[in-house]
Amino acid sequence: PKVNSYCCCLECYYPVDGTASGSRCEKCAWPLCDDCLKMDELPVHSRECEVFRNAKCKFYNLSEADAISLQLDCITPLRVLLAMKANPQRWKDEVEPMEHHRNERFGSKAWAADAQNIVAYLLQACKLKEMEISDELIQRVIGILEVNAFEAKTLKGDFARCLYPKLAILTHSCTANT
């Protein structure tokens, strides 16, 4: 999901009701749409589902169905970190070298907000410290996403945040040529 997005299915990104009456994953109780609940396997949501279950990390229901869900801001960084653990070589070759503007971001309001809202949440509530993930690494991933992520539309027309390491290289010029 994009930063500051409305509540969406964590498998297909279709908007879902973020209140207590919304549909949830049977294993971790995080948002999933009715169609994805019927699927036998959830290839996108499965890794974070396991983290949420093991950490007993709860999704906090929204007061209004169409409210922004700040809790979902942690999902994309978490997915990048879990992909790093699953495929360390790909991380080393493709993602780790990506620009993240650490020096420009460090000490900024955005850095402080990310430290409180995403880093602390992932380290404490999701227990990523136990996976040997540091606050500095999470901030790096957040920076990589801020600098390199693309907004894309799903097949249903909903928006998602995507990271294409090779495509991101094309966007790194003040004078566009492609």
Image (tube, helix red, strand yellow):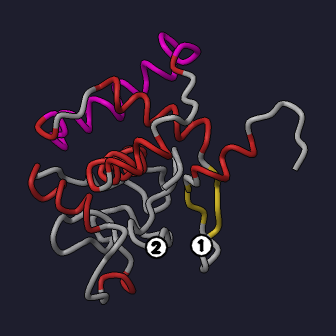
The disc at residue 12 is 2
Q: Which residues are magenta?
A: 103-129
Give the image location of residue 137, x and y in percent. Answer: 34, 29
Instruction: Quadrant for residue 125, please give it.
Output: top left
Q: Is 161 rendered above or below residue 4? A: below
Please, what secondary structure does the residue beneath circle 2 have?
loop
- Give the CA separation, mark 2 to mark 1: 8 Å
Q: Which residue is mark 1?
A: 154
**Relative side of 159 to 61, left or right:** right
> Relative to the observer, which residue lies in front, 150 or 19?
150
Above or below for 104 versus 74: above
Judged from the image, the secondary structure of the residue bearing numbered disc 1 is loop
- Using the image, determine if residue 64 lies above or below residue 139: below
Give yes or no for residue 109 being in the magenta stretch.
Answer: yes
Residue 60 percent across, percent down from the top left: 26, 51
Q: Residue at x 48, y 56 (%)?
A: 1
Q: Is residue 169 left or right of residue 95?
A: right
Q: Are marks 2 and 1 in contact (CB under 8 Å)?
A: yes
Point out residue 90 in the picture as x, y percentages from the top left corner. 41, 51
Q: Main secondary structure of the magenta part?
A: helix
Pointer 2 or 1: first along the chain = 2
Q: Is residue 15 left or right of residue 81?
A: right
Q: Residue at x 28, y 82 (%)?
A: 41
Q: Is residue 14 above or below residue 78?
A: below
Label 1 packing within 10 angstroms: few (<14), some (14-19), many (20+): few
| Residue 133: % across, % down | 23, 34
Quadrant for residue 23, please give it: bottom left
Q: Amino acid at mark 2?
A: Cys
